[in-house]
Amino acid sequence: MIDHIDEIREDFPILKREMNGYPVDYLDNSATTLKPKAMIDEVVRYYTYLGANAHRGDYEMSAQVDYAYEGARKTTAEFINAARKEEIVFTSGTTESLNLLAMMITNQLLHEGDVVLSTETEHASSILPWQQAGYDKKVSVNFIPLTKEGRLTIDNFKKALEDNPTTKVVAVAQVSNVLGYTAPIKEMAKIAHEKGILLVVDGAQSVAHMPIDVQDLDCDFFCFSGHKMCGPTGIGVLYGKFELLEKLHPMIFGGESNARFYKYEALVLKRTPYKYESGTMPIEGALGMAAAMRYLKKIGLENIHEYELELKQHFLERYEKELKDKVTIYNAENGCGIITFNVFDHGKLIFPQDMASFLSSKGIAVRSGQHCAKLMGDLIKAPGTVRASIYFYNTMEDIDRLVDALKEASFENTLDIFF
Ligand code: PMP
């Protein structure tokens, strides 16, 4: 239970700022989250006290950085219950993690005619890298059919596997960033593994909102970004089962990934995960992300999930009474804090970007457009949607402000913003 919201809000300095003359009502948490002071302080501590590079120096300051950086790896492993800290590779974010996996797996393990199964609601970074890597090799990306609301079901998954018998990889998000439905990852892993198929999970939208246990899910890879979980930008994670990370060969080479390299034929790479971390890493990012994870653990991931649902329920109750005639929600039953909708004035769609600008004029931050998932045209017959995404520092009042603004919105006053 979250019963100390005022205290929590004090932890986020940015909540003191205004937008267009109103206290900021930040409901764009799927794009990125706000940052608690504990995380900001950790980044500042690196720059004001630690300072040195990691895994390079033979002096005390450098050893302190090594200790902090490897500590961040351990914190990250514990956060998702990885079996060992060496299963955590730091990257710049989900996008880089997914791109690296698509390139490594396609180049090293797949053959012409193999199939990567995905879905049409995936973020671009979970489809494009596979299409790109598979293009020359004639490895295709095919889609698991979704229900009419956009859910991924086990029955449809099994059917897609029957229709695509050469499937070697399944790459899906645990929680969709557009609709917020949760994929049945654990059951999918079991079915995939019975057929020797690898399961790559995009955890960008799940990791900060529910407890994650990669051993229980039994996925082969799990990717996420620090900035969507109260951490810094420019840091993310590629989790992989140790034996798979050992088997793959990295895509990026440089200092610190190799043990010896006199001749290329004699290249000896360091062990996992260091062979994947060439060049100077975002050290302050890793430390900051670990601080964010400690902070989130203190609040409790179960509590966060439950609180988001409480706020969403409040929205839905007011929606039923006050908004039903003019707002269409596409995902009321998704079980998370992502609300995707469109607003209509006498049946005429208010263009989502106009709606977002109107809400901004009232200090409310939401996302509008296609949310980097551009294949969804058949599921939502509109040029885009408005997305409000809730996090644990939002309040009932934030939700009330959104509902009040939606009630007020009309075709005319949303266009007025531009004139
Ligand atoms: N996958 C999903 C489901 C996402 O929501 C996002 C971010 N919107 C990404 C991948 C990409 O994350 P990043 O931009 O942090 O690399």
Image (tube, rainbow, N blue to C red):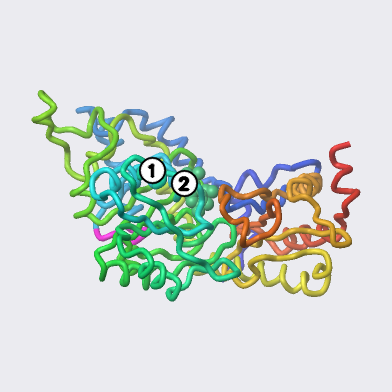
Q: Is the shortest distance between ligand 1 and the CB of mark 2 under 8 Å? A: yes
Residue 99, labelled with which disc?
A: 1
Dot 2 corresponds to which residue?
125
Q: Is residue 122 magenta?
A: no
Task: Work out whether residue 37 or residue 109 is closer to the camera in this orientation and state it.
Answer: 109
Q: In which quarter of the image is residue 342?
A: bottom right
Q: Which residue is drawn at 47% across and 55% down?
A: 295
- Above or below residue 74? Residue 192 is below
Q: Is the shortest distance between ligand 1 and the CB of mark 1 under 8 Å? A: no
Asked if the residue at tag 2 contacts the one at tag 1, i.e. Cβ–Cβ closer than 8 Å, the answer is yes
Upstream in the sequence, badge 1 or badge 2?
A: 1
Picture quarter with the N terminus: bottom right
- Which amino acid, mark 2? Ser
Give the percent coordinates (x, y) of residue 245. Answer: 23, 49
* Residue 90 in view: no
Real-space CA distance between mark 1 and mark 2, rounded to the nearest whole angstrom: 7 Å
- Relative placement, left or right, of 277 versus 6 is left
Q: Which residue is drawn at 14% across and 33% down?
A: 259
Within 10 Å of disc 2 (Cα), the crowding (few <14, some 14-19, many 20+) is some
- Above or below residue 177? Residue 268 is above
- Which amino acid, mark 1? Asn
- Above or below residue 200? Residue 218 is below
Give the percent coordinates (x, y) of residue 184. Answer: 43, 70
For the stretch drawn in magenta, what is the main secondary structure? loop
Identify the magenta region.
Answer: 78-83
- Relative placement, left or right, of 230 versus 220 is right
Task: Work out whether residue 31 or residue 126 is closer to the camera in this orientation and state it.
Answer: 126
Picture quarter with the C terminus: top right
Residue 185, labelled with which disc?
A: none
Give the percent coordinates (x, y) of residue 417. Answer: 85, 41
Q: Residue at x 28, y 37 (%)?
A: 251
